[in-house]
Image: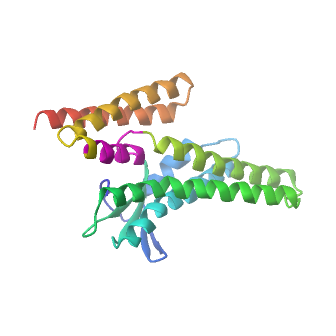
Amino acid sequence: MLGHVAPTPYDLRFSLFGIPIRVHPFFWIMTALMGWDGDEIQLTFIWIGCVFLSILVHEFGHALTARYFGWPPEVVLYHFGGYAAFQPHWGYTTGRAIFVLLNGPGAGFLLYGVTLIVQYMLVENRLFPEDETQRWYVLYALFQMKYINLWWGLVNLLPVFPLDGGQIARHLITQWRRHDGWEMSLKLSLITAIGVAVYFFMHDVRYAGLMFALLAVSSYQELQQGMYR
């Protein structure tokens, strides 16, 4: 469990495969801002749908794996993405923890493969809509599904805390160096986050650059707090 986002009266709540899901209202707002298209609002709604489905599948990769190990999960989508909350009451091992973490991006990569298959079938069987506008909407949705599930999944595996890659790195480093692994994982997170933020800003990808700049600040603050405990 990475943290807790307080519930609001405006949360969307439902369950899927017996797993409770809560969507914070800021999830919709932040997602809309990321993909806002004032000229064609339909594209904004398609983008929101693609992000919602992709992040939900990602978190279900975590959640279903946790439930397999007997740890009842809950999925929460919020303004910075989402998380699968669970309490490993028994049977917790580093290997299982890493397996749970890997299955989030793994589910996204699987969805990326499914999207490729759907696109191939549409092209092969000439099932695209005849209307040019509708065809563009379908192509736009396919492109975004591929982009989100491939590239966001790869970025999520970077050793930056609290991304999945950062948590995996922390588990591995602390297994290797128990006395200072926590500190080393935060230093790795800080250096990587700064480098990635600079890269995104240089390529004018401002939202991603800002996100990694904030993650760098978070790693630095956690490192400082740990040093002065």
Q: Is residue 93 or residue 194 the one in the foreground?
A: 93
Is residue 173 a member of the stretch shown in magenta? yes
Q: Residue 111 in the image: state x and y as whole percent.
A: 61, 58
Q: Residue 36 in the image: state x and y as whole percent.
A: 60, 43
**Residue furthest to the front:** 176
Q: Is residue 188 or residue 221 the one in the foreground?
A: 188
Range drawn in magenta: 159-174
Q: Is residue 187 or residue 206 the one in the foreground?
A: 187
Task: Work out whether residue 219 can be spotted.
Answer: yes
Is residue 133 a member of the stretch shown in magenta? no
* For residue 116, side relative to residue 135 (left or right): left
Q: Residue shown at 69%/56% (left/top)?
A: 115
**Residue furthest to the left:** 229
Q: Residue 43 in the image: state x and y as whole percent.
A: 68, 49
Q: Residue 23 in the image: state x and y as whole percent.
A: 44, 61
Task: Work out whether residue 10 can be spotted.
Answer: no
**Residue furthest to the bottom:** 18
* For residue 91, side relative to residue 14 (left or right): left
Q: Is residue 127 above or below residue 68?
A: above
Q: Main secondary structure of the magenta part?
A: helix
Residue 6 placement: quadrant: bottom left
Q: Residue shown at 35%/47% (left/top)?
A: 167
Q: Residue shown at 51%/60% (left/top)?
A: 56
**Coloring applied to the structure:** rainbow
Q: Residue shown at 49%/50% (left/top)?
A: 29
